[in-house]
Amino acid sequence: MAKTSELLDAHALRKRLERLQRVLEANRRISATLQPEELMRAIVRAAAEVTDSEQGAIARYDPETETLRLEIAPWLTHTRRSAISLPLDNNPMGQAYRSLWPVLGEAQPELEARNLLAVPLVVDGAALGVLCAVNKRENEFDKEDVLVMEHLAAQAAIALENAEMMHQARQGYTTLAELDKMRNDFIAITSHELRIPLGLVLGHASYLKEILDDGEARQQSETIEKAALRLKQIVEDLSKIELAQSGTAVLRTQSYDLSAQLHSLLDMHTAPANEAGIQLSSQIPEHAVYITADPNKLFVAVDHLLKNAISFTNAGGLVQLSLLEHENWVEIQVADSGIGIPAQDLPRVFDRFFQVEDHMTRRHGGMGLGLTITRTLVELQGGMVSAESIEGKGSRFSIRLPRQGWGASAE
Ligand code: ADP
């Protein structure tokens, strides 16, 4: 027959195992929660459960009052909970927070507590707050309670910090998305509102230019007209991006000969390239290369790449326009031996308003929208744009397009 002491030992062992199981179960539950408030509620429930207590609580440090405030204390009303601030000394929670050790507390009438066990929630040697088990159901808190609470608090502190970081990151993303929307709205409204006054300025400037004799006044009206035309170009660029990004751009695709289109683009850019002392060459098949695409949009995209290549290449340099044929797709390349793009800036050249040189000191015109437009117009028809560059040596921009148009893949 087993001795009474052995039976007691077995009983104690079983109770211990049950408790460990509860701690494991509590850990599992808290690591499945990512919302900070919900997580704190799960932690205080677990604290009460694993210590056989009536309640659990979490207090956090408030730098303004330099005291601990109860974040979660489910048995107190919101008003009562908010009214309580716990000093860092003369108080078991404050002492646990400061010392980073568990502290057993006697009756705390303010908290309706007969007894409590406070353990710090520590991450990287610093306390995030204090976890408490309140009102042990039978007897007093013992060593075993301290051990399980320490174990729970270690897991809870990490889970809490992760959840808070995740929450902050999500809030950051939401703010960014809101800012992006505000920026898009601003661009859309501004470009729309500028159209009418700009049309008037342009109309009147060209009327004056017509009626004035050669002289200073006529020159001035020409300057006004030029500036207004430049503004019109900017407004149109902004609208192109806005249209494409809002999904309202209309794609007018047709099957046409891309090699003929590239030849005529080449012709258009020959004179400006020569004027800048740049040799413009090509590697375009003489035969027709049929693709299904929107010719106007593709024209704008390639035209801009050629303009950039010529602008960012010094006299004596080379610019080459090539068309490479693959089975299901084609590749248009614009390569130059120009100033190149620093490696750290390359990933950003397609971003809206991005310019390598500072906008205020740069020698080239433009608003950093051209490549955004190029990418938008190409992606709209199922294609891709990429850039390679070596600073001081040159750049190569490539447009890949599916031969059969949208829906067919450009690998
Ligand atoms: P922008 O119309 O103001 O030139 P883009 O969007 O076309 O703006 O280009 C963004 C920036 O990328 C340019 O300001 C320039 O710094 C850089 N860039 C574009 N194309 C080239 C190129 N071929 N060689 C060197 N830098 C380039």
Image: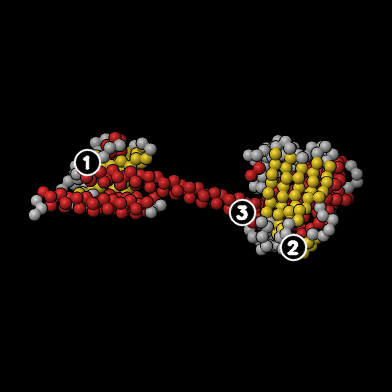
Towards the viewer: 81 or 222: 81
Identify residue type, mark 1.
Leu
Compute the Cα span from label 3 to label 1.
58 Å
- The image quadrant that residue 359 belongs to is top right
The residue identified by callout 2 is 292
Badge 1 marks a residue whose secondary structure is strand
**In the rendering, at what x and y percent does residue 223 appear?**
81, 44
Compute the Cα span from label 3 to label 2.
33 Å
Q: Farthest residue in the right direction?
A: 213
Identify residue type, mark 2.
Thr
The residue identified by callout 3 is 185
Label whose residue precedes the other's in the sequence (3 or 2): 3
**In the rendering, at what x and y percent does residue 132 appear?**
27, 45
**In the rendering, at what x and y percent does residue 57 appear?**
29, 48
Q: Residue at x 81, y 56 (%)?
A: 259
Q: Is residue 108 visible?
A: no
Q: Residues within 10 Å of mark 3 (few under 14, many from 20)?
A: few
Compute the Cα span from label 2 to label 1.
78 Å
Label 2 CB less than 8 angstroms from ligand 1: no
Q: Residues within 10 Å of mark 1 (few under 14, many from 20)?
A: some
* Foreground disc of the pair 3, 1: 1
In the image, taking residue 225 as reference, residue 247 lies left or right, namely: left
Q: Residues within 10 Å of mark 2 (few under 14, many from 20)?
A: some
Badge 2 marks a residue whose secondary structure is strand
Quarter containing the C terminus:
bottom right
Q: Farthest residue in the front direction?
A: 1
The residue identified by callout 1 is 104
**Ligand 1 picture quarter:** top right
Label whose residue precedes the other's in the sequence (3 or 1): 1
Identify residue type, mark 3.
Asp
Quarter containing the N terminus:
bottom left
* Foreground disc of the pair 3, 2: 2
